[in-house]
């Protein structure tokens, strides 16, 4: 089948590569010439495990190509996926200008029937806007062409995106006619070998499903963070509480870890956008407002722990920071908790030496371009590896739970730091064992009676 994917970011590249891997003829289009140039030269603009090899293999076999030629891309695909960004507008609602611009492009160049599929995360009612945009341009052209609008939200997780796409828990497809649903089922059939888990529904429900899913996940995180903070105060352990409640099948064990708050390109903006949709329809979305407020506070929680130990003035202090990306297995820094920690440390006068296995280049780009980091560049340096961040630091602050941080050489950490002191924003280590190893150790929701 012929597939075009507009937008060659995380979602577009993963979808394009996976559709190619299952034998389809795919063109990935983007308006960013640098990105397409890199892809055509064999590079991949993002870090996602397995993606480079998958693209390389399918490119070599002629099943995937990359272009900035939007006309060529439109003419190619029977299926035209829209996988462009939907960043928050100034008021928190999803900015649809990129989505509608692709709709306009498709309508301007199409010469036969197209299935136009919205894979970007978009508010309820966007399919109607896309349909109106396409029809307006076709009318202007005097072109009597037919098209389908489909909603097919994406649920992949960065860091495990290929697996999520190839072996999905479910594929949600919103359609307004059976023929479009059947074609989507055929396209996704290769990914349904484990189980038939295509959920076909109406378009508005599909659009809402994506926001409801991300908002539920964000709610779990904020809920557990709030409970963890209370555990700290009352002397309970969030580890025990998590196991205790997770074993209730109605709750389940997944996604119950307390930490330094959620970030990334999806949860923050999708929670905000759903609150905005609620406002537009007279629903005040109280739970989601609280989810957002708790997360905002939680991102500064590590910083508060550092201040609690050292005071607000951190001039003359030096900190080692492990983990910058918003979660492991990605170089994505969008809304990363590390940025809040970094900003707070720098503004309080501290020096920071940071390490991340993948996100250092992206962090350098952010430090150079975000106004809050202006005038602080000389306070930050980057380490070659995790241990290289430690020498003569007053403490290690762990922000992202990369695997390599899970079982480090504690003796080496101890001998490198000025004093053996760790602030752990991801609860990676056992508090009692850390005390036995001679560390002063702070984590989230696991108070210690006998801190070293
Ligand atoms: N990143 C994720 O984990 C994830 C998961 C599920 C859903 N989503 C949703 O998918 C959508 C895309 O997210 P992403 O992370 O891939 O975004 P991204 O920012 O990584 O990529 C978007 C790409 O679209 C390109 N683009 C913009 N306008 C274009 C146009 N008119 N024609 C062609 N290309 C154009 C941009 O240059 C960019 O390369 C968003 O709505 C997001 O919420 C993301």
Image (cartoon, rainbow, N blue to C red):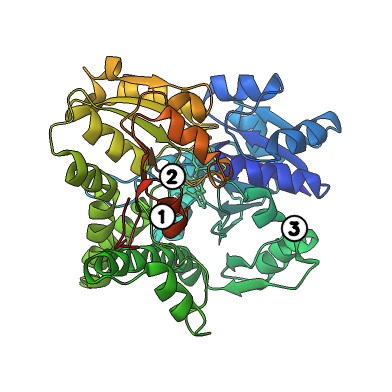
Is disc 3 in contact with disc 1, using a CB cutoff of under 8 Å?
no
Between residues 388 and 39, which one lies in front from this camera angle? 388
x and y, in percent, of residue 123 in the image: 39, 59
Q: CA distance from mark 3 to mark 1?
A: 25 Å
Is disc 1 in contact with disc 2, using a CB cutoff of under 8 Å?
yes
Q: CA distance from mark 1 to mark 2?
A: 8 Å
In the rendered view, tell whether residue 20 sits above or below residue 130.
above
- Whether the residue under disc 1 has CB within 8 Å of ligand 1: no
- Whether the residue under disc 2 has CB within 8 Å of ligand 1: no
Figure quadrant of residue 196: bottom right
x and y, in percent, of residue 447 in the image: 30, 62
Is label 2 in a helix, a strand or a loop?
Answer: helix
| Residue that carries the numbered disc 1 in the rendered image | 129
Residue name at image x 38 percent, y 53 percent: 262
Between residues 225 and 150, which one lies in front from this camera angle? 225
**Mark number for residue 187?**
3
Is disc 2 in contact with disc 3, using a CB cutoff of under 8 Å?
no
How many other residues sit within 10 Å of disc 2, few (<14), some (14-19) or many (≥20)? many
Residue name at image x 63 percent, y 21 percent: 38
Between residues 206 and 421, which one lies in front from this camera angle? 421
Which residue in the rendered view is the most extreme toward the top? 378
In the rendered view, tell whether residue 333 sits above or below residue 191.
above
Is residue 79 in view? yes
**Mark number for residue 100?**
2
Of the image marks 3 and 1, the number of the one nearer the N terminus: 1
Residue name at image x 71 percent, y 60 percent: 167
How many other residues sit within 10 Å of disc 1, few (<14), some (14-19) or many (≥20)? some
x and y, in percent, of residue 345 in the image: 24, 32
Is label 1 in a helix, a strand or a loop?
Answer: helix
């Amino acid at each position: 089948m012929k597939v075009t994917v507009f937008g060659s970011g995380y979602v577009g590249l993963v979808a394009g590569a996976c559709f190619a891997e299952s034998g389809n003829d795919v063109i990935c289009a983007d308006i960013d010439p640098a990105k397409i140039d890199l892809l055509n030269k064999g590079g991949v603009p993002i870090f996602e495990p397995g993606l480079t090899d998958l693209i390389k293999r399918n490119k070599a076999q002629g099943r995937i190509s990359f272009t900035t030629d939007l006309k060529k891309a439109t003419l190619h695909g029977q299926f035209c996926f829209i996988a462009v960004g939907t960043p928050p507008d100034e008021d928190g609602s999803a900015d649809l200008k990129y989505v509608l611009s692709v709709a306009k492009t498709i309508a301007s160049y199409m010469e036969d029937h197209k299935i136009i599929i919205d894979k970007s995360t978009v508010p309820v009612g966007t399919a109607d806007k896309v349909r109106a945009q396409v029809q307006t341009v076709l009318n202007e052209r005097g072109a009597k062409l037919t098209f389908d609008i489909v909603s097919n939200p994406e649920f992949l997780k960065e860091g495990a995106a290929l697996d999520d796409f190839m072996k999905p828990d479910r594929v949600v497809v919103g359609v307004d006619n059976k023929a479009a649903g059947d074609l989507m089922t055929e396209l996704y059939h290769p990914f349904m070998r484990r189980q038939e888990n295509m959920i076909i529904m109406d378009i508005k429900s599909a659009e809402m499903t994506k926001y409801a899913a991300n908002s539920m996940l964000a709610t779990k995180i904020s809920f557990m963070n709030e409970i963890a903070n209370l555990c700290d105060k009352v002397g309970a352990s969030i580890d025990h509480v998590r196991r205790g409640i997770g074993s209730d099948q109605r709750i389940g064990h997944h996604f119950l870890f307390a930490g330094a708050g959620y970030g990334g390109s999806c949860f923050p903006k999708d929670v905000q956008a759903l609150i905005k949709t609620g406002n537009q329809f007279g629903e005040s979305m109280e739970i989601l407002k609280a989810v957002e407020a708790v997360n905002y506070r939680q991102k500064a929680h590590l910083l508060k722990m550092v201040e609690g130990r050292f005071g607000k003035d951190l001039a003359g202090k030096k900190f080692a920071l492990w983990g910058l990306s918003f979660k492991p297995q990605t170089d994505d820094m969008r809304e990363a908790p590390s940025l809040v920690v970094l900003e707070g440390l720098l503004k309080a006068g501290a020096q920071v030496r940071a390490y991340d296995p993948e996100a250092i280049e992206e962090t350098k780009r952010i430090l150079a371009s975000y106004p809050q980091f202006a005038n602080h560049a000389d306070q930050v340096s980057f380490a070659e590896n995790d241990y290289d961040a430690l020498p003569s630091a007053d403490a290690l602050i762990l922000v992202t739970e990369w695997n390599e941080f899970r079982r480090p050489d504690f003796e080496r950490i101890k001998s490198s730091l000025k004093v053996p002191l760790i602030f752990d924003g991801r609860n990676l280590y056992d508090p009692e064992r850390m005390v036995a190893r001679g560390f002063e150790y702070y984590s989230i929701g696991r108070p210690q009676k006998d801190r070293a």
